[in-house]
């Protein structure tokens, strides 16, 4: 994927990138919401935990990351 930060991708681009294993998919919802429903292969990293857990869960700072949530958090 050749994109800059803060780009928006559509559903087909997301599916292609996931199939190619070209991105890390991050779900920023609560663990409870993540357990109830999430996109397969996604990593759960709630918004409140990003400062503390991102270095552990996302060690490659240059890797493409797609973040999603279910609405305002």
Image: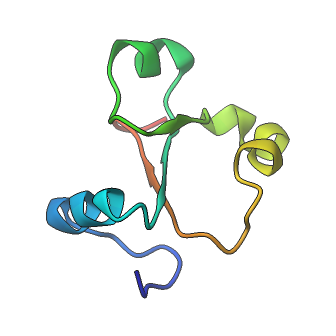
Q: How many marks?
A: 0
Q: Could you tell whether 73 is left or right of 15 in the image?
A: right
In the image, residue 46 sits, relative to residue 33, either above or below, namely below
Q: State the residue lying farthest toward the front.
A: 20
Residue at screen point 60% across, 32% down: 46
Quadrant of the rendered image containing residue 56: top right
Residue at screen point 35% across, 34% down: 40
Look at the image and name its color scheme: rainbow
Q: Position of residue 53 (x, y in %)?
A: 78, 39
Quadrant of the rendered image containing residue 51: top right
In the image, residue 11 sits, relative to residue 45, either above or below, namely below
Residue situated in front as seen by the camera: 22 or 67: 22
Q: Position of residue 45 (x, y in %)?
A: 61, 36
Q: State the residue lying farthest toward the left.
A: 12
Residue situated in front as seen by the camera: 19 or 39: 19
Q: Could you tell whether 55 is left or right of 39 in the image?
A: right
Q: Position of residue 57 (x, y in %)?
A: 72, 43
Quadrant of the rendered image containing residue 66: bottom left
Q: Position of residue 28 (x, y in %)?
A: 52, 38
Residue at screen point 33% across, 65% down: 17
Residue situated in front as seen by the camera: 42 or 32: 42
Specify the quadrant that holds the N terminus: bottom left
Q: Could you tell whether 45 is left or right of 24 in the image?
A: right
């Amino acid at each position: 994927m050749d994109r800059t930060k803060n780009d928006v991708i559509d559903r087909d681009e997301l599916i292609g990138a996931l199939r190619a294993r070209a991105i890390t998919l991050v779900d920023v919802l609560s663990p409870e919401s993540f357990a109830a429903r999430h996109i397969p292969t996604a990593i759960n990293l709630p918004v409140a935990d990003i400062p503390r857990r991102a270095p552990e869960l996302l060690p490659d700072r240059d890797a493409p990351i797609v973040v999603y949530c279910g609405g305002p958090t």
